[in-house]
Amino acid sequence: MISPSSPTWLMTRKILHLDLDAFFCAVEELRNPDLRGKPFAVGGSPQGRGVVASCSYAARQYGIHSAMPMAQAIRLCPDLIVVSNRHGLYDDVSRRVMARLRQFTPLLEQLSIDEAFLDLSDLPEPPAELARRIQAAIRNEFSLPCSLGVATNKLVAKIANDVGKSRARGAEPPNAITVVPPGQEAAFLAPLPTRALWGVGPKTADRLAALGIHTIGDIAAYPEAELVRLFGKHGHDLARRARGIDDRPVVTEHETKSVSKEVTFPRDVADRRTLQRTLRRLSEGVGRNLRRKGLQGSTVKIKLRWPDFTTITRQTTLSSPTDQDNEIYEAANRLFSAAWKPGRPVRLLGVGVSGFGRGYRQLSFWDIEADRDRRLQETLDRLRSKYGVGAVTRGGRESGG
């Protein structure tokens, strides 16, 4: 950890980046302590197209990493334990952790299920002390490991955390705290490879390397005008980021454009009932997320991918916005029945809703039935919250449309 001198933080922002270490695996270890210290991965079945969603630090010692095909992971580690995803459980734990973090500051920007920025500028304690306090709270109250990076802006805080986590050794999570003091941003970034900088992917890194630019410090030292000539506006952004400049605020709410869920089948599926059952399950997941966010949407969309990777989408507009599973499913099923020919194999199936309004619904003659369905939906939500997403399913006929 780079040690800050507290007075230098008085007139600057204190931005913290928090990452729950191997989050899915950490939650699984709480359910089954026997997994601790063992190589295991959370993800899909190795018999099909399953991929690694998360892997323990013991598994990483074999070269296993997220997004790797599960079959490849097992070749690297034949004794690898494979655990199925429990997305409902991970979502629930994530919500509780984020709610706890908001008790430190309401200025929280959630980046993903296991990652967030916090703006701690209004808190008087030195940032290293704040980071230790937050880390201890997550460990003591949730038994979860987390790593934190602190700096004067989001860019450097995130990279600092990445650097701290990369120093992890052995089978244990890093639990790192890395603090970059004000004025030290450029010096901290300088020795890092260009790929560590936001906005530098493989192609940009190759172009930079061809210019003799291999580190972030090399970017900072390169004439900005020349970077702009070569990369356009992106060149200006590269020059600023390489000097550790980032004025972006912590954004507490992002406007949701759409809510969707999709699944890639382990093997191509051509059976209508299986496809429609999957369509219903996806529709229920979308509806659940809409209600959680307080959103209703009027556009329902489906996504189909064939075995040759050709992908099509179809959408329809409803007469009124909805957040109800059955209405989403009925619309999605109509689209599916029109787009799919019996016996045609499907590789991927997805459902989405967009065109949002909040809490608005056109009143109609059929509102008595709609209210009954809504009450039923609320009951199902309560039961699923208590017993799990798969514990209660809603009956319904699957038809040819």
Image (tube, grey):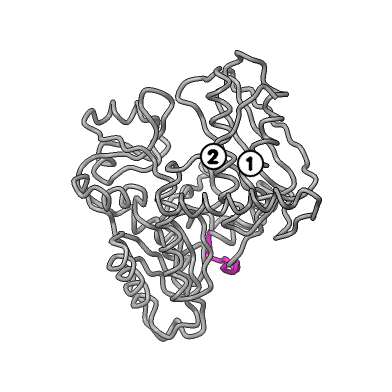
Q: Nearer the viewer, residue 374 or 331?
A: 374
Q: Nearer the viewer, residue 130 or 153?
A: 130
At x 55% / y 18%, what residue is drawn? 271
User: Which quarter of the figure is the C terminus placed in?
Assistant: top right
Residue 277 seen in the current view: yes
Quadrant of residue 286 within the rendered picture:
top right
Say which amino acid is labelled 2: Arg
At x 40% / y 49%, what residue is drawn? 387
Question: In the rendered image of this protein, does residue 344 appear above or below residue 239?
Answer: above
Residue 228 seen in the current view: no
Total of numbered circles in the picture? 2
Say which amino acid is labelled 1: Asn
- Residue 250 drawn at (x, y percent): 56, 68
Q: Earlier in the sequence, mark 2 or mark 1?
A: 1
- Residue 395 drawn at (x, y percent): 55, 36
Spatial distance from mark 2 to mark 1, Cα to Cα?
Answer: 9 Å
Q: Secondary structure at mark 1?
A: helix
- Which residue, given by chain and number where applicable, does mark 2 sit on? 394
**Magenta extent:** 242-250
Residue 326 image label: 1
Q: Nearer the viewer, residue 67 or 233?
A: 67
Q: Please indicate whether residue 166 sits to the left or right of residue 278 in the image.
A: left
